Amino acid sequence: MADGRRLALITGASEGIGAELARIMAAAGHDLALVARRQDRLDALAEEIAASGAPRPLTIVCDLLQPQAVDILLSSLEAAGAQIDILVNNAGYGLHGSAHRLDRAEQIGMIDLNIRVLTDLTLRLLPHLVSVRGRILQVASVAAFLPGPHMAVYYATKSYVLSFGEALAQELKETGVSVSVLCPGPTKTGFQARAGLDATLFKMLRPMNARDVAQAGYRGMMAGRRTIFPGPLNGASAFFARIAPRFLLLPLVARLQAARKN
């Protein structure tokens, strides 16, 4: 990618953790490229950031599930004369329900967005990120540490994001590139509505604010931390999941997820 405007790229930036990361990073002095499907929300966020005195972010409207989406995204960045020094892979979604009852195409789409697009974008930008000793933030979940009956595909995709991110962090240790994996628990975003989770039960789980999660993610990324847990409860949950036997975890998670049905 040619030298030019140096940007931090955030996917899934129109709401939730992605939008809060954009606000936090702009306030910290980062110039941004924001990617999402909804132009109205992207434009509103870009105007809000510009009104705060920061440079107006480059906005790219792109449905990352469409064929050649990563090609289109990178071409748009090239045309804008942008180079990406920080990559935040935040775009993703989940679905609640038994795998044999959920729509197959939507589940495959989840794998495409949560895994394929994240991996493709990371690998394509990696040579440049190595050359500038850049940073990568992969947004996973505490779900990455668990088997996920009734959200089987989602949990599996986040396990991949965690494994991929941790392995890259080790591989790139000597290059100066930092790779961090953000592992939030329940968070107040549009995720629960998209996934089909019961709103009343979700509130009982004491979800964190997206702003607090994003702040933890940004600070952890800038500190070069490999794995980031917003809040002590999420870190404790991940620790328990690592040591607990699967024969205990599987029925426990299955009961919890079954209780979340609408």
Image: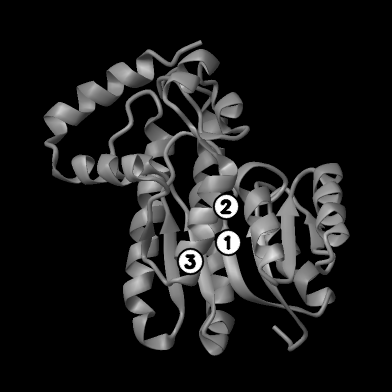
Q: Residues within 10 Å of mark 3 (few under 14, many from 20)?
A: many
- Looking at the picture, which amino acid does disc 2 mark? Asn
Asked whether residue 67 is in view, the answer is: yes
Q: CA distance from mark 3 to mark 1?
A: 10 Å
Q: CA distance from mark 2 to mark 3?
A: 13 Å
Indicate the position of residue 255 as horizontal and vertical percent values. 29, 16
Q: Residues within 10 Å of mark 1 (few under 14, many from 20)?
A: many
Choose top left, top right, bottom left or bottom right for residue 4: bottom right
The residue pinned by badge 1 equals 88
Indicate left or right for 220 with 51 as reference.
left
Q: Secondary structure at mark 2?
A: loop
Check the image and name the residue furthest to the top. Answer: 262
- Residue at (39%, 63%) from the top-left corner? 165
Residue 50, placed above or below residue 188: below
State the scheme by which the image is colored: one colour
The residue pinned by badge 3 equals 221
Q: Secondary structure at mark 1?
A: strand
Indicate the position of residue 183 as horizontal and vertical percent values. 41, 49
Q: Quadrant of the N terminus?
A: bottom right
- Pointer 3 with pointer 1, Cβ within 8 A: yes
- Pointer 2 with pointer 1, Cβ within 8 A: yes
Indicate the position of residue 37 as horizontal and vertical percent values. 75, 45
The residue pinned by badge 2 equals 90
